[in-house]
Image: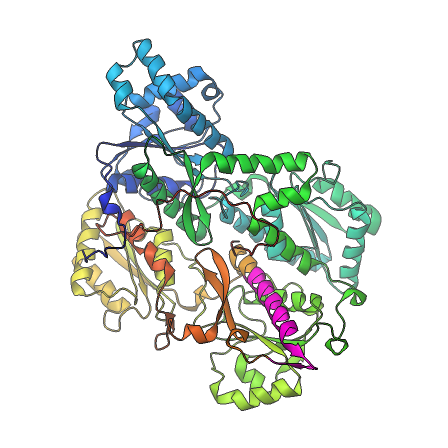
């Protein structure tokens, strides 16, 4: 193990010896729960704690017996990709009574369990907090009745609670995403994409009802991701007269030769008088007023089904590890906490602060304070809503800002794609064009990147031209890897000819999409998978974490033949147990000598008699296909933010009929850093980038690399310097910047 920096904190100093952790899932199931369970079990065992499954949620805790079972490392093998929860979930009325909680306390004390990891919704977590508050009183009552010794009361004096939110609705305040939400969005978008083909064939209107009794997140983000014509959510009811407004909008779209209309309805949608808006009501309205062929599709529990997405697997794994760390660090004075996601960081928040804010949302809706309800949902939700409103309704020309010659704010703005094509590019272009038009600008599309720009392949692009682009893969504008250096003079000429005031460039060194391949082994088989990414190991590393890989070889972390041999030996030992499958990922440029073929041959030779090997080079399939909900939404939001920044800069630098933009901050890169979307001057990037290998010098995701190794049973060092601080739930004002979360 390498020397550890003095200013870093490493989890090796935390020991779980002598501690027992119970893990349960409660309430509705959600994809990714199993990944969280797996992470808790393996991290707990890794730090030498005992870990127990509590089957069937609180009901199993109350019933005891075989419902509370100590588990091993192998107990959670091959559950990462399984939907639902393998340890079961059940509603438990008995746990709501003190008598039921008394039984639960007794069953836990019998096994020495004083650390609980609860995966569920706000109801499940509220119940856990009440259990914790009553704990000492419950133990005293058990001692007085003679069921436990007085010594046990002193030994197990307090109960530690850490929660993880498993809910497809993303209805819990304090976290950008809950476990299961991204997978549910995948199910919805798969249906929407399928519906679009048949709707276009017959010029139909589809009303799609999605889950969300009290929270409109799934409906809102689905609408944003597919470019729906209208969306109904409980937090933001339509204005009076919405029936006529919606029908006018649908008619206008049909008049523009749009062959389909999509309307998305959250199951809890209401009007401004708190009266229900159902999918059938919307359908009847469209048929009666417009006569359109209209169909209703109610997705129901299909949104809970299927395998968890890569995002949910990684999110749940990170949260599970963080939950164990929180339990190890907890004291008698530590309040029950919930592990949340803020930007790209896992954070700990007081559980009851989050629950209280979640309950305030419902209270605001009941009191018809809908703007307050949206604000309480958080910055991400509010930004999604504002972006959807910007992109879905085109303002009349009379309401757009006037020409900048009249001292207003409209300019000529060009959009182009560069580098490799990536899913989500088209959503970003659509967003840029529509927000630009809303800002009063004339928007231009550049075909085939900088090379096309130099050759004059530039044309004005309208609001309707980008309709239906969100779900399209690749780059509809065309893109080439050509750099602008050799075309600078020609590009400058084109900018002068077309009077281009600003450029929005979508691309980068290399653009990656997440891996869409899952290797499921049969009898003792190891898969060697090569991923794309150039010299950037993000795909291999995060794909490895999402798929439960045994090793992932990347350029950023050097390896030699000794490490390869150690990995083979480690995998060989694992395969001698009940584990049947192995997965090894290699970034395409991780090492020029240790090629994918070399690694395949090494594993094949050394694993003879124990396992056989298969090799797969994924290639350009990683860039193909429809963009994921995350890519559509993130591309849309980040692009809207970029155009708004461009508009602000143009207004600031416009004087006497010209734009004077010579400062360093007039050319910026927009991206996420820790928890926020930030604009960074490009000149600053030269010190932060490795231009030879086209990667950043510091990669945030490298901090997650040890997680994959820990969960694959390797001894390693894990920097937890960013962990351990219990934060408070932030209450933001409407003007605060968006975190950039989906």
> How far across and how far down the image is residue 88, in percent?
42, 32
In-front residue for pair 503/241: 503
101 sits to left or right of 462: left
In-front residue for pair 137/285: 137
Q: Give the range drawn in magenta.
A: 635-660
The quadrant where residue 596 appears: bottom left
Above or below residue 280? Residue 665 is below
Q: Does the magenta stretch include residue 621?
A: no
Prevailing secondary structure of the magenta residues: helix
Evaluate whether residue 28 shows in this view: no
| Residue at screen point 63% across, 42% down | 373
Residue furthest top as drawn: 145
Above or below residue 604? Residue 487 is below
The quadrant where residue 142 appears: top left
103 sits to left or right of 75: right
Picture mark count? 0
Q: Does the magenta stretch include residue 649?
A: yes
> How far across and how far down the image is residue 642, in percent?
57, 67
The quadrant where residue 447 appears: bottom right
| Residue at screen point 47% across, 86% down | 485
Evaluate whether residue 254 shows in this view: yes
98 sits to left or right of 372: left
Residue furthest right as drawn: 289
308 sits to left or right of 589: right
| Residue at screen point 52% across, 88% down | 488
């Amino acid at each position: 193990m390498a020397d550890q920096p003095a200013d870093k904190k490493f989890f090796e100093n935390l020991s779980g010896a002598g501690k027992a952790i119970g893990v349960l899932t409660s309430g509705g199931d959600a994809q990714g729960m199993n990944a969280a369970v797996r992470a808790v079990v393996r991290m707990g065992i890794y730090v030498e704690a005992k870990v127990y499954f509590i089957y069937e949620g609180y009901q199993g805790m109350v019933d005891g017996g075989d419902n509370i079972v100590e588990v091993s490392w192998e107990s959670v093998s091959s559950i990462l990709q399984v939907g639902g929860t393998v340890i079961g979930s059940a509603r438990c009325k008995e746990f709501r009574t003190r008598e039921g909680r008394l039984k639960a306390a007794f069953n836990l004390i019998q096994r020495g369990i004083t650390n609980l990891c609860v995966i569920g919704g706000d109801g499940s977590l509220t119940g856990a907090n009440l259990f914790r508050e009553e704990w000492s009183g419950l133990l005293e009552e058990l001692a007085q009745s003679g069921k436990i010794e007085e010594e046990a009361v002193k030994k197990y004096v307090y109960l530690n609670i850490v929660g993880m939110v498993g809910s497809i609705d993303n209805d819990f305040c304090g976290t950008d995403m809950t476990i299961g939400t991204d997978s549910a969005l995948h199910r919805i978008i798969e249906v929407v994409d399928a519906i679009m083909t048949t709707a276009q064939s017959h010029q139909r209107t589809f009303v799609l009802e999605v889950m969300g009794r009290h929270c409109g997140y799934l409906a809102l983000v689905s609408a944003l991701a597919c470019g729906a014509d209208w969306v109904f959510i409980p937090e933001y009811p339509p204005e009076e007269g919405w029936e006529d407004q919606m029908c006018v909008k649908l008619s206008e779209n049909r008049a523009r030769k749009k062959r389909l209309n999509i309307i998305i309805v959250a199951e809890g949608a209401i009007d401004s008088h708190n009266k229900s808006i159902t999918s059938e009501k919307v359908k009847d309205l469209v048929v009666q007023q417009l006569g359109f062929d209209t169909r209703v599709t109610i997705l129901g529990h299909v949104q809970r089904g299927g395998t968890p997405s890569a995002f949910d697997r990684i999110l749940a794994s990170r949260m599970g590890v963080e939950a164990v760390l929180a339990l190890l660090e907890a004291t008698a004075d530590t309040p029950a906490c919930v592990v949340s996601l803020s930007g790209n960081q896992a954070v700990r928040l007081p559980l009851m602060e989050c629950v209280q804010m979640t309950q305030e949302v419902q209270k605001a809706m009941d009191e018809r304070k809908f703007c307050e309800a949206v604000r309480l949902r958080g910055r991400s939700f509010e930004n999604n809503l504002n972006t959807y409103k910007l992109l879905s309704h085109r303002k009349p020309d009379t309401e757009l800002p006037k020409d900048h010659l009249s001292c207003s704010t409209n300019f000529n703005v060009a959009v182009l794609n560069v580098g490799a094509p990536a899913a989500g590019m088209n959503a970003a272009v659509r967003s840029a064009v529509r927000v630009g038009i809303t800002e009063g600008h004339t928007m231009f599309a550049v075909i085939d990147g900088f090379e096309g720009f130099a050759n004059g392949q530039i044309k004005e692009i309208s609001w309707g031209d980008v309709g239906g682009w969100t779900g399209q893969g690749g780059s509809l504008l065309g893109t080439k890897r050509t750099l602008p250096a050799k075309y600078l003079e020609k590009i400058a000429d084109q900018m002068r000819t077309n009077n281009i005031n600003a450029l929005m460039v979508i691309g980068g060194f290399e653009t990656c999409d997440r891996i869409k391949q899952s290797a499921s082994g049969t009898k003792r088989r190891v898969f060697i998978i090569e991923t794309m990414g150039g010299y950037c190991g993000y795909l291999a590393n995060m794909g490895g974490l999402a798929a439960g890989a045994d090793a992932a070889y990347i350029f950023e972390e050097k390896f030699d033949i000794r490490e390869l041999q150690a990995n083979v030996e480690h995998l060989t030992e694992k395969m001698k147990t009940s584990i049947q499958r192995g997965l090894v990922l290699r970034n395409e440029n991780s090492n020029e000598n240790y090629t994918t073929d070399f690694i395949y041959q090494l594993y094949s030779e050394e694993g003879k008699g124990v396992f056989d090997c298969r090799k797969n080079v994924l290639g350009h399939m990683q860039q193909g296909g429809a963009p994921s909900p995350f890519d559509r939404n993130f591309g849309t939001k980040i692009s809207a933010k970029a155009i708004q920044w461009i508009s602000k800069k143009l207004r600031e630098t416009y004087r006497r009929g010209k734009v004077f933009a010579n400062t360093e901050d007039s050319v910026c890169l927009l991206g996420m850093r820790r928890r926020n979307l930030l604009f960074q001057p490009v000149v600053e990037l030269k010190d932060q980038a490795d231009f030879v290998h086209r990667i950043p010098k510091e990669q945030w995701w490298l901090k997650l690399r040890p997680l994959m190794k820990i969960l694959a049973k390797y001894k390693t060092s894990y920097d937890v310097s960013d962990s351990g601080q219990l934060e408070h739930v932030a209450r933001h004002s409407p003007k605060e910047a968006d975190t950039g979360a989906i």
